[in-house]
Image (tube, rainbow, N blue to C red):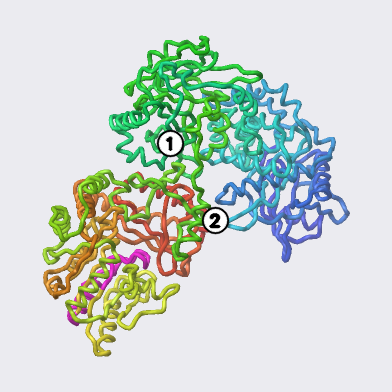
Amino acid sequence: MNYDNLKISNQQAEDILFKLFQIKGKATALPGELDFNFRIKVDNAEGYILKISRPNENENYLDFQQQLLQFVADHGRNLMAPKVISDTNGNAISKITDDFGKERHVRLLSWVSGRVWSGVNPQLDDLRFSLGKQCGLLTQALQGFDHAEANRPFDWDVAQSLWTKDHVDLFKDEEKAIVEYFQNLFENSQDTYSKLRNAVVHNDANDNNIIASSDLIHPKVEAVIDYGDAVYTQIINDLAVACAYAIMDHNDPLEAALPIVQGYHSTFELQEDELAHLYNAIAMRLVISVTKSAINKIAEPDNSYLLISEKPAWEVLEKWRNISSDFAHFSFRDACGYEAHPKSKSFKDWAEKQSFELNHLFPTIDKNDVHHVDLSVSSKWIGHQEEFNDLDLFQFKIDRLQKKNSNKIIAGGYLEPRALYTSDAYDKIGNSGRESRTIHLGVDFWLPSGTPVHALFDGEVVIAVNDAGDKEYGGLVILKHQADDFEFYTLYGHLSVESATKNRVGDTIKKDEKIGGLGASQENGNWVPHLHFQIMLSLLDYKNDFPGVAYYNQIDVWKNICPNPNVLFRSDALQKTVGTSNAELINYRKQHLGKSLSLQYKEPIKMVRGAGQYLMDQYGRKYLDTVNNVAHVGHENYDVVKAGQEQMALINTNSRYLHDNINALAEELIETLPPELSVLHFVNSGSEANELAIRMVKAATGERDIIASEVGYHGNSNMCIDISSYKFDGKGGSGAPEHTHIFPLPDAFRGKYRGDDSAEKYAEEVQKQIDVVHKKGRGVGAFIIEPIISCGGQIELPKGFLAKAYASVRAAGGLCVSDEVQTGCGRMGKTFWGFQLHDVVPDIVTIGKPLGNGHPVAAVACTPEVADKFANGMEYFNTFGGNPVSCAIGAEVIRTVKREKLQENALKVGTFLKDEFRRLAQEFPIIGDVRGQGLFLGIELVDADMNPLAAQTDYLADRMKDHGILMSTDGPDHNVLKIKPPIIFTKDNAEELLFYLRKILAEDIMQF
């Protein structure tokens, strides 16, 4: 029959509802494969779902569904499920005759309120856990239920899925190969699969049948509806169905599946033999889905519901095919609390009975003791990234360490999080941003090239190759060993190519027989010579390689698959030391550090290494840094670090002695400043710089009154707090002191005056404060402001405001101070200093954060007139200000900005970002304003009535952190995202930032 003749209109549904149930309601069509479903809204009640069958539907099948719902109502504790509503004659199933004379069956069920799964964004681990939990509860509730129709032939039953073999010709090329692969895998597993537990299960937890709560931040699955696909089948199939749909649209579908498995197991305990079949059961549900879509595209080309999941199903199948079935199995076991590898305990028991010494592995090296070397991401020994990538230097350090420990083998590395793996081959894009393989799975023995390596026990060669490439193994041999009732493997990496490839797959290597010799760096993957020794309980699906480094989020599985090689040697030096946990660090801080010291993010991060525009935590996860403008030319910039180290090794003293460095830094800065600002004083921080500037003001003018902006911040010393509205008008503050005068934040977007013509009005507010000072019989000392007000929310000063304000202040005899602590040194892009954006020249400029790239160095630049008046006989001396080390660092920072054209980079990348942020604002109305210059930008989030959205801004920053991007919030209403990264930030970095901003802005809580 033509599909148009089958359809039921909304009006027809409303008429049927009233005729059978005497209920008046508003009908809206819902998706459905067989039934025509309608959401019925009624006044003052939750409403209903009306289900109208296709003609000639099997009434026994409908009775099965109704009885099943009643069984769940009777037996389902803590379960929300649709209730059966009888018609006016008391029937659970009613009948009608449609316009074509065909009999249809009608059922009415109570409506389960909430949001369908497909309408929930984001779908995070907690939500997926709750999905598994609800499905497990439902399976538990259905235990003991039976009905003749539960055993019907059913295409959507995974156990019956081999019917799809008759339709493989609907697919071509790669798609056909994927489908056949999983069909064959499933067919070959029937002996054990057919013996798994069976029961009636829901069998259809797809994204339109799952109901989640209305909580936008922490949603939970509250119900699973539509029991039409319930069937008597293997219980594991029910979990497979839930996983198959919920893992769609994820880069890593296996990671997405694990919380569902864990949740299911928490309410319905899964058996170990069932988990062995879950990987393929998920695949076969997807095979059914794509096969159905292919068939239905021909049969009912206008039925879009049948095609809803086709594209994402194919995407999952392609990714699923690339996941080792064994690794998936081990991951499922781990999620359920079982040992990830079924033979893990057997191996441990066997290993405890063995006894080996290192001279069995290296018989020509008469050593059995180990000196542990730390190559972790936190290690000071490996030094800077530039140094550990310098093979000659690394070799020198190993040789020197070996000389100091001549009777020991240099070794270490098991489960060490490392930053050594800089090749892109170690990275992937996971479900939450970029991930890097950092966790080392073997032990490294650092010995000279050519050192013979011998077998610890009899083994069969299963891999012997040249694994060529940067940071690969080079010569690689893997042996398979038989022990008791299990087998395991040992891996020998970084051998010479010749010695590795002389072995042949299938060869037997006896205990104590030579396997190969260590390779030189030219052939071992560009490493200093060493042996990577690893144990594996499974080879997974690898044929010519095997990971020696794993992702941190998979560590529990990998350490079970790859046990510690030290179980064989029992070396105390190779025992992994346990570091201080984040919780312990936080507890200590709470006890012994000031309570006013805050931590970033709801779940703080421990950072242990910086590299350019990235920070790394103790597990080696890299975070793209859009916040820390202190690291002006990149975290741990090698030239800057080297300049400091080299000078520190010579001398570090005060400025009372002659030294070239203080003059060199002065020269570099003066070259960037207007000729009027030709005198410098060096200090240690932005706060000290602004403190000194105020002293200069008092000495030069004889006045104490300072005019500053609302929400301005100028430092943490007493005098700086006194001129910082951000502090004294905030929590714990007590308002402006007598000699501080605050004018309204010159915010043209949401300030007191708005729009392009607001400059004049804000300049008048400055004049009002001048008048206030004069009325008190005093004179103006200075006007201080940032060229872009940072704590105010990256507020760009209205065009023309600063020139007018400067003119008014100078007319009153005051000085003009530009606080460039945040904005200076090329960050603005168009100009080197922020004040230059406004075509003004201040009397004093304060310079801080960026000058030292993380080292405490700052400066005050002023006119000769100010400097002369400050030199009134009272000596200015700063013990550390202008010391040779600080000046060496500061000079190198400025040289780096100039040499690497980083001001131009700030302009180019900043302009790109600002333009793209404005495009985002057109797509997402929550973005009210985009502002700033260069790489000093702000995004303000507001609702339609211009009210600030602090909670959403905080949420956005926290979710970006989840995706490996650091962001921060600011502004008087805490609703502005600050973007002020190191100015080496690239266009690629910007595009990554934009990609994840767009992703998070699309989440439910961000919609306005």
- Which one is nearer the viewer's eye here, 372 or 767? 372
**25 over 477 or under it: above or below:** below
Q: Amino acid at mark 1?
A: Asp
Q: Residue furthest front?
A: 407
| Residue 162 pos. (x, y %) | 68, 25
**38 over 496 or under it: above or below:** below
Mark 1 lies on a secondary structure that is strand
List the residue tagged with mark 2: 1004
Left or right: where 820 falls relative to 163: left
Q: Amino acid at mark 2?
A: Asp
Q: Quadrant of the N terminus?
A: top right
Give the alpha-carbon distance from disc 1 to disc 2, as whole Å: 30 Å
Res. 296 visible in picture: no
- Which one is nearer the viewer's eye here, 200 or 118? 200
Of pointers 1 and 2, the one earlier in the residue sequence: 1
Left or right: where 310 falls relative to 688: right
List the residue tagged with mark 1: 427
**197 over 827 or under it: above or below:** above
Mark 2 lies on a secondary structure that is helix
The boundaries of the magenta stretch are 784-813
Local packing at callout 2 (Cα closer than 10 Å; few below 14, some 14-19, many 20+) is some
| Residue 295 pos. (x, y %) | 63, 31
Res. 731 visible in picture: yes
Please count the marks in the image. 2
